[in-house]
Amino acid sequence: MQNKMKESDPILEVKNLSASTDNLPILKGVSLTVYPGEVHAIMGRNGCGKSTLSKIIAGHPSYNITNGDIKFLGENINSLEPEERAQSGIFLGFQYPIEIPGVSNLEFLRVSTNARRKFLNKEELDTFDFEELVKEKLEIVKMDHAFLSRSVNQGFSGGEKKRNEILQMALLEPKIAILDETDSGLDIDALRIVASGIKKISNAQTGIILITHYQRLLDEIKPNYVHVMSDGQIIKTGESNLALELEEKGYEWTDNFIKET
Amino acid sequence: MVNENLVKDVVKEPYKYGFVTDIETEKIEKGLNEDIIRLISQKKEEPKFLLDFRLKAFKKWQKMKEPDWAGLGYKKIDYQDIIYYSAPKQKQKISSLDEVDPKLLETFDKLGIPLTEQKKLTNVAVDAVFDSVSIATTFREELAEHGVTFCSISEAVKNHADLIEKYLGTVVPASDNYFAALNSAVFSDGSFVYIPKGVTCPMDLSSYFRINSGDSGQFERTLIIAEESSSVSYLEGCTAPMFDTNTLHAAVVELIALDDASIKYSTVQNWYAGDEEGIGGIFNFVTKRGKCLGKRSKISWSQVETGSAITWKYPSCLLLGEESVGEFYSVALTNNLQQADTGTKMIHIGPKTKSTIVSKGISAGNSKNSYRGLVKMGTKASGSRNYSQCDSMLIGDQASANTFPYIKSQQPNSEIEHEASTCRISEDQLFYLQSRGIEFEEAVSMMVSGFCRDVFNQLPMEFAAEADKLLALKLEGSVG
């Protein structure tokens, strides 16, 4: 199984990536390769650089890449704008989804979906056709239609915000989804809904990176690889049982690791 | 960290309406004195009461001083260097649109306001004002069938002198302020609306003001009277050519609503704003006020102010009638070196009166954008309420936003509520939208129109879409 996957080309290749913000180094040589169909989990203490890694892959303007490359479907994307990355199929599920007052969720989702469709040379959807599509996708995250008429994420509960993220993922059908602590702040039922949503959307052609602190998400979506980050580096990579071990022993256990080069 | 240059590029869209119509005009000599005023009045064949009104106003104006309390920076205006009457030359009496100079029709066509029978807008009656005179008013017969009068104010002076004499200057007296006095002395044209008792105006009424000559001021005067239980929605649009000199626009608008009447007055102001260095542009010094004279009457102002080098206006409501309602919904966008000082006055005089103020200021470039408003509860305004919300959005780090809410209450049994906020387009919001594939510029304009949503919702449908587009155009290049 593992080998078969690797016969194809990787979706994402992060090579020896270093990055800083305000001249403060955050990432110090991260390498990570994701092949189609793979699920990678990234764990590690708060502040270790997990979220930064995800934002840099998505193109956040606050970070400067000081060394290394990010390749998506074989192309270097270091200099692409965030919207170009998104249109070509990179999706970042935010840890804290942003509220945008006055902008209707429905319109936001439609403009966003059409931007991706345009890139894929698919016909852009008008309001009516989009309504049809979004109805179908709402099912996946068990969201009520009423969410669509509210402002983007405004007044949403933590769980609603996260479900709205997965709804966006469902609409955009990305090649790779990086989900930054999508499980945090969810109750057990919401976690199941979100996890089953992610599973429904992903397939043998897509890659997933789950950034998480908790085993419970990984119980629902079993990762092929688990990476442990510390101080801007991946200090250990293992299979799914590594996450279990971490849960048992805590991050202190990883303090003893020396970076395996 | 937001890329400043990118932001700037977004706001730089060239002004689409900057062309000049090459047309022969009849202009009187520059300058202002009693003879000039007599000449204007004579050209317009006005009755004596109006000439007296003008002359009285002129005397008052001479004794007044140009106000400086708004702290607006501009070069002193030389009032003797302005032409106070400028009209395109055409035949004396025009009986139908066919006789209007095709150049004028073409001008309004270009502005998106077709006037001819074949092309005119189907759901809105338009009064088109070019420099000092009204060119044409559409749908007059249809409106007349409902008893609605919609014509230029010059025409109303001739045909409805009684109404003009009764109401002109009763809401904004000539002595009200410097620019109102000037307007009262020299006003040239504008629109007049009369809605009789019990009539709901069958379509939106609209005036389109076009300044064409660079050296003449525009001083239009609008008067709207809504009799008992009547209602009307009125729209106003404005554009001007690009000149490197400043043109003075000092209008007065008076609204009167009797028992159970309602007037909705919407403005999309897009006068030429001057260039990036602040050269040229219109000085928009306007006095707009409505009087809710009757019980349960309602006056609602909504405005989208995007143009002019300087905007200085406070559409206000005098709430006299018991349970009358005043509303003010405003979006003011400034860019480059534009200055806007705008807001409202809600004067609660009668009992159980209600007012709502929603103001959204967006400042980009090096512009200054201030909200200035007064809410006053008089001694008899028992059980009255006001709610005000003033939000500012800053784009870039060179623009400024201010809020000056003045509150005066002489009535303990009344409520005044004020909320204010200032925000920036945050990098996180932009990144969120961009990370969903939405282009930078579209993301900015989405957020700006989201910010203005509460106000746009108050605009008539066609206007709301136009306002959205206009804002996006104005901001193109300003955000990054």
Image: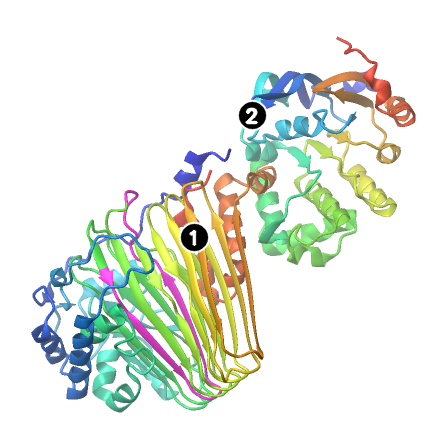
Q: Chain of mark 1?
A: B
The residue under the point 66% across, 28% down is: A52
Determine which residue is flagged by label 2: A22
Q: Nearer the viewer, residue B136 or A22?
A: A22
Please tell me how crowded label 2 is: few (under 14), some (14-19), or many (20+) other residues with Cα within 10 Å: few
State left or right for residue B312 relative to residue B385: left
Residue A31 falls inside the magenta stretch: no
Q: Of the residues shown, which amino acid type is indicated by label 2?
A: Asp
Q: Image height check: is B62 above or below B78? A: below
Residue B249 falls inside the magenta stretch: yes
Callout 1 touching callout 2 (CB < 8 Å): no
Query: Residue B465 location, x and y as percent?
Result: 46, 59
Query: Residue A58 location, x and y as percent?
Result: 62, 31
Q: Nearer the viewer, residue B236 or B377?
A: B377
Q: Chain of mark 2?
A: A
Determine which residue is flagged by label 1: B471
Stretch in magenta: B248-277
Q: Nearer the viewer, residue A105 or B365?
A: B365
Q: Image height check: is B3 above or below B221? A: above
Q: Nearer the viewer, residue B101 or B272?
A: B272
Estimate the spatial distance between the alpha carbons at disc 1 and disc 2, rounded to whole Å. 33 Å
The residue under the point 16% across, 76% down is: B59
Q: Image height check: is B266 above or below A134? A: below
Q: Image height check: is B466 above or below A77? A: below
State left or right for residue A47 relative to residue B371: right
Query: Residue A100 location, x and y as percent?
Result: 60, 49
For the residues beneath circles 1 and 2, the answer to whether they share a chain is no
Query: Residue B142 location, x and y as percent?
Result: 36, 83
Location of residue B299 by image quarter? bottom left
Extreme residue in the right direction: A248
Please tell me how crowded label 1 is: few (under 14), some (14-19), or many (20+) other residues with Cα within 10 Å: many
Q: Of the residues shown, which amino acid type is indicated by label 1?
A: Leu
